[in-house]
Amino acid sequence: MESEEDAVKKERVMEARARNISHNVRCTECGSQSIEDSQADIAILLRKLIRDEIQAGKTDKDIYKKLEEDFGETVLYAPKFDMQTAALWLSPILAAAAAGGIWAYQRHRKKTNVHIMALNLVRGVPLTPKEKGTMLEILTPPPPEGIGSSTWWRRLVGR
């Protein structure tokens, strides 16, 4: 009785492994579906190949390696990180860094008042803090009305 339960348990584990591997392998005929979801002849053959490899005692890594050697790297949904795919993997980080740099530059430009810097150059003597405060009050334009974090949402929704 125990051996029968062990056999059923072992079969379930093998089936779960096969389904997991099949979900991570692209159908070479369909292209956009995993071999688990595809009903193409090649997908059926690949699912059988995976199950045979599992029964032969191969690890998941060995099976992925065999599939990659036989069908190329495009058969796997998650490509490896190497020099050819580095741009693909690093592009989100580079885009976020560029956006952060632009945001920081604009914020810095907003805080730097060109008029006070020009006045310092003309006078030759830096302004006192009180003079700077007065100049900022005079020269800083009021913020444009209607620009806030929620106004773009109101415009989008239609008030």
Image (cartoon, rainbow, N blue to C red):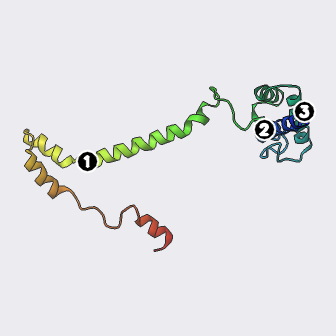
Q: Which residue position is annotated with label 2?
A: 25
How far from the left and from the top, in percent, is residue 18? 82, 37
Q: Closer to the N terminus: mark 2 or mark 1?
A: 2
Q: Say whether residue 43 is left or right of residue 97.
A: right
Identify the residue shown where x is 15% and y is 57%.
137
The kind of residue tagged 2 is Val
**Where residue 123 sits: x, y (%)?**
7, 42
Question: Mark 2 or 1, which is nearer the eye?
Answer: 2
Q: Amino acid at mark 3?
A: Ser
Residue 154: percent from left, percent from top: 45, 69
Can you give x and y, in whole percent of width and height, for residue 8 in the image? 88, 38
Q: Residues within 10 Å of mark 3 (few under 14, many from 20)?
A: few
* Point 83% across, 44% down: residue: 36
**Mark 3 falls on what kind of element?**
helix
Check residue 3 in the rendering and tell me which mark sits there, or answer none: 3
What is the distance, in whole Å, between disc 3 and disc 1 at their CAs? Answer: 76 Å
